């Protein structure tokens, strides 16, 4: 079953003998859900697994308590690359585990029991699947320790702690702290559409606006750089014709008139010279 989908309902006449029939458990108010959950958990504890009664009780418990998942998921809404739909789905898995493992004899409110399961499942999801760059588990856990230590030290010191202060607080070496801080950069891959300055408006400058592009003149520069030595190997007449044709953009007829040569002769000289240059640029 997809955790985000409503569990399949069982027809009312088969299951309402000992439990109230709830047509849409997702609409039950949280205050009513607490009382009803205890009743359904008591019956779930004695019903035979696989029966329509057991299925109805379990599915209704899941639907009634999806508000707990939504509540727990809200604290993770700003956690970078995690899609909230995925977070809700993973949190629902935690809710189902809590329902299956709840022990009525412990005299603990189901809500207090379920929230740690839901939050734990969501945290595991972020820890294991949402790193933009794969890093060792040791460094993933160190990132969490560093985040907690930073928060504590900011309150204590009134400023951002230094690497040395973080190392002392965590009883680690400065090198280990640096490794953890560097690894934390792989947690979220920043979008190039993220605002690039203090202005977070949609029409403000983006990081993409500051990125360079391929200079169209770069290929020309490389070609000219490679062509320079080849031009030096030409004789004076060949260099003069090349300069007149491509530097001064003269026609073959104009070049022939200035050099007292026929246009046909200039054409043959140009072809021979250009072939020589191409051969030098693109050797076989």
Image: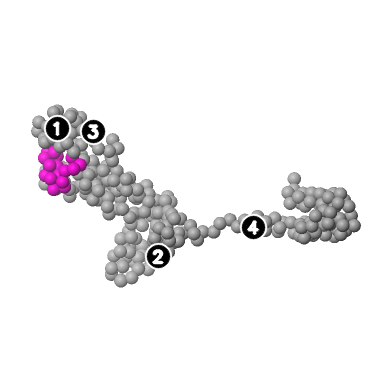
The residue beneath circle 2 is: 198
> Which span of residues is magenta-colored?
25-43
Residue 78, quarter of the rendered image: bottom left
Residue 47's tag is 1
Quadrant housing the C terminus: top right
Marks 2 and 4, the one that precedes in the sequence? 2
Instruction: State whether residue 158 is above or below residue 52.
Output: below
* Distance Cα–Cα, label 1 vs label 3: 18 Å
Residue 57, quarter of the rendered image: top left
The residue beneath circle 4 is: 217
Residue 50, quarter of the rendered image: top left
Question: How far from the left and from the top, in percent, is residue 146?
Answer: 34, 60
The residue depicted at 33 percent of the width and 60 percent of the height is 147
Could you tell me what secondary structure mostly forms the magenta stretch? helix
Classify mark 3: helix, strand or loop. Answer: loop
Residue 8's tag is 3
Residue nearer the viewer, 122 or 28:
28
Classify mark 1: helix, strand or loop. Answer: loop
* Distance Cα–Cα, label 3 vs label 2: 49 Å
């Amino acid at each position: 079953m997809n955790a985000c989908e409503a569990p399949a309902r069982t027809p009312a006449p088969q299951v309402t003998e000992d439990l109230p029939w709830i047509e849409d458990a997702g609409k039950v108010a949280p205050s009513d859900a607490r009382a009803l959950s205890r009743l359904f958990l008591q019956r779930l504890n004695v019903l035979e697994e696989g029966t329509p009664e057991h299925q109805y009780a379990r599915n209704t418990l899941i639907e009634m308590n999806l508000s707990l998942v939504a509540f727990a998921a809200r604290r993770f809404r700003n956690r970078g690359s995690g899609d909230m739909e995925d977070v809700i789905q993973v949190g629902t898995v935690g809710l189902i585990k809590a329902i299956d493992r709840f022990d009525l004899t412990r005299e603990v409110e189901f809500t207090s029991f379920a929230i740690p399961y839901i939050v734990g499942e969501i945290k595991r999801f972020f820890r294991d699947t949402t790193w933009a760059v794969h890093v060792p588990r040791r460094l993933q856990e160190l990132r969490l320790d560093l985040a907690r230590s930073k928060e504590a030290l900011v309150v204590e010191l009134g400023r951002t702690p230094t690497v040395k202060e973080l190392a002392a607080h965590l009883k680690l070496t400065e090198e280990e702290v640096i490794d953890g801080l560097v690894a934390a950069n792989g947690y979220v891959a920043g979008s190039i559409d993220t605002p690039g300055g203090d202005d977070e408006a949609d029409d403000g400058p983006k990081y993409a606006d500051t990125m360079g592009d391929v200079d169209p003149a770069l290929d020309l520069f490389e070609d000219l750089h490679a062509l320079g030595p080849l031009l030096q190997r030409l004789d004076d007449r060949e260099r003069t014709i090349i300069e007149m044709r491509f530097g001064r953009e003269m026609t073959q007829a104009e070049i022939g008139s200035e050099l007292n040569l026929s246009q046909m002769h200039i054409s043959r000289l140009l072809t021979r010279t250009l072939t020589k240059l191409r051969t030098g640029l693109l050797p076989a």
